[in-house]
């Protein structure tokens, strides 16, 4: 398996607009995209920090994964996403090593990336995501 870098850090927020203001006005970062991912019942906002992104996630449905996360734990870091070369291979490798997968096969996430989540019970408490940008040559 080849993890190349941390692609993004997913952060659950209760109000996307207010959080964008914090990241822009206080931290001086620039939000370069806002996107709704209907499948995941979230609205996302992206910031570039070096080669790593911050992905703010606001729930569009209290029954969605971020809605439930915020209800249980409040706002905060939600997941860590690794960029991998060959996402299918990386998934079967961790599965063969005993890690349960939330997504057995990659699906489309924000920005058209292929993404898949690993179950946090098997990753020592951190919800982990693998992603690969197959649009890039
Ligand atoms: Zn993510």
Image: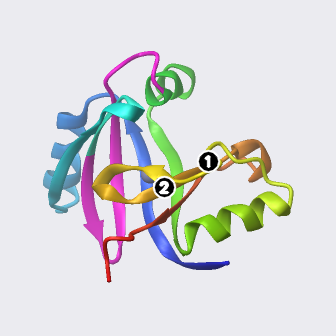
Image quarter of the C terminus: bottom left
In-image side of 43 versus 25 (left or right): right
In-image side of 24 versus 109 (left or right): left
x, y percent for residue 62: 41, 16
Overall secondary structure of the magenta stretch? Answer: strand
Q: Which residue is mark 2?
A: 115
**Mark 1: secondary structure:** loop
At a point 39% along the width and 71% down the height, the residue shown is: 134
x, y percent for residue 132: 46, 68
Q: Is residue 104 magenta?
A: no
The crowding category of the residue bearing disc 2, from other C-alpha atoms within 10 Å (few below 14, some 14 to 19, many at least 20), is many
x, y percent for residue 4: 52, 81
**Mark 2: secondary structure:** strand
Q: Are marks 1 and 2 in contact (CB under 8 Å)?
A: no
> Which stretch is magenta?
45-64
Front-most of residues 37 and 107: 107
Q: Earlier in the sequence, mark 1 or mark 2?
A: 2
At a point 55% along the width and 52% down the height, the residue shown is: 116
At a point 52% along the width and 28% down the height, the residue shown is: 69
Tell us which disc is closer to us: 1 or 2. 2
Residue 98, picture quadrant? bottom right
Count of numbered circles on the image: 2
Q: Which residue is mark 1?
A: 127
| Numbered badge on residue 58 | none
Mark 2 CB near ligand 1 (8 Å cut): yes
Front-most of residues 61 and 17: 61
The crowding category of the residue bearing disc 1, from other C-alpha atoms within 10 Å (few below 14, some 14 to 19, many at least 20), is some
In-image side of 88 versus 26 (left or right): right
């Amino acid at each position: 398996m080849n993890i190349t870098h941390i692609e993004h850090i997913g952060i659950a927020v209760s109000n996307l607009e207010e959080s964008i203001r914090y990241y822009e006005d206080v931290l001086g970062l620039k939000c370069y995209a806002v996107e709704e991912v209907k499948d995941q019942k979230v609205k996302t906002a992206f910031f570039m920090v070096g080669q790593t992104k911050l992905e703010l996630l606001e729930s569009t449905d209290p029954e969605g994964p971020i809605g439930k996360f915020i209800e249980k734990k409040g706002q905060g870091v939600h997941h860590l996403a690794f960029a991998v070369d060959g996402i299918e291979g990386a998934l079967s490798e961790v599965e063969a090593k005993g890690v349960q997968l939330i997504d057995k096969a990659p699906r489309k996430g924000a920005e058209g990336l292929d993404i898949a989540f690993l179950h946090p019970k098997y990753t020592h408490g951190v919800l982990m995501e693998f992603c690969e940008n197959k649009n890039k040559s």
